[in-house]
Amino acid sequence: MKQLINSMLKAGSMFIIMTFLISTGCQQQPDYSKELKPIFDKYYEVWKTGNVDELDAIIDPSFMRHADAGSSAKSLDELKKVITEFKNTFSDVKLVSEEEIFTENKFAGRWSFTGKTTGSGERSSNGKSVSQWGINIIHFKDGKIIEEWDGFDNVPMLEQLGFVMTPPATEKK
């Protein structure tokens, strides 16, 4: 009888442990994209259209954008200038979000863009087509974007525009 009780206790204990592990390990993770994707989509839409007035609703006043020297921004106003310059240079820009990962208050993804330099921006307006890809990480707080890290390689784009990379001259000894 004692052996039967011990077996039942062990089986009952194992059942409780297994039930706990399954119930806690299989819990559905929150779908952060439901809250963050509409903000993200609006941000990308502004890059496509150049309608920078729409940024006021989705960008925090303390916003920081970390990118190359020409497209970093330390405020909402600087971001508006960066996007306006980009859109002026590539008036026919096609920006595509290739991969999207949403977590709590963060987005990470890969993007690509194609465009022709037909605009009036600072970059060459020679009518050449370019394509480029990059990655970005965006941080959200209270329903607004507070920070962006954008990584891309400008050398291929500059080469597509006709620039030639020349190594520095070596000094003779």
Image (spheres, helix red, strand yellow):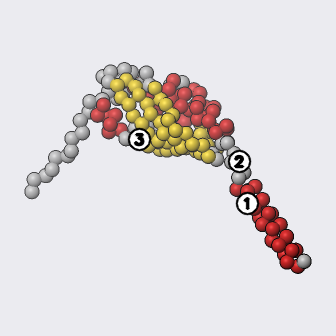
Tell which circle, 3 or 2, labels the residue nearer the N-terminal end.
2
Alpha-carbon neighbours of circle 1 within 10 Å: few (<14), some, or many (≥20)?
few
Label 2 element class:
loop
Residue highlighted by disc 3: 152
In this rendering, the answer to whether 120 lies above or below 2 is above
The mark nearer the N terminus, 1 or 3, is 1
- Residue 129 location (% of width, % of height): 34, 25
Which of disc 2 and disc 1 is earlier in sequence?
Answer: 1
* Kind of residue indicated by mark 3: Phe
Q: Local crowd at mark 3 within 10 Å, few (<14), some, or many (≥20)?
A: some
Which of 105 and 74 lies nearest the eye of the viewer? 105
User: Picture coordinates of residue 160 (x, y %)?
Assistant: 30, 31
Q: In which quarter of the image is residue 72?
A: top left
Callout 1, which amino acid?
Answer: Leu
Residue 109, label in figure: none
Q: On the rendered structure, is 83 left or right of 123?
A: right
Is the C-beta separation of discs 3 and 2 under 8 Å? no
Q: What is the three-letter code of the residue carrying label 2? A: Gln
- In the image, which is nearer the foreground, mark 3 or mark 2? 2
Quarter assignment of residue 2: bottom right
**Distance from Cα at disc 1 to Cα at disc 2:** 14 Å
Q: Is residue 40 visible?
A: yes
Q: Do the residues labelled 1 and 3 touch (CB within 8 Å)?
A: no
Q: Which residue is drawn at 78% across and 59% down?
A: 19
Q: Nearer the viewer, residue 99 or 133?
A: 99
Q: Residue 28 carries which label?
A: 2
Q: Evaluate whether residue 62 shows in this view.
A: no
Tell me residue 84's x, y (percent).
47, 27
Q: How far apart are marks 1 and 3 (CA)?
A: 43 Å
| Residue at the disc numbered 1 | 21
Q: Name the quarter where the N terminus is drawn.
A: bottom right
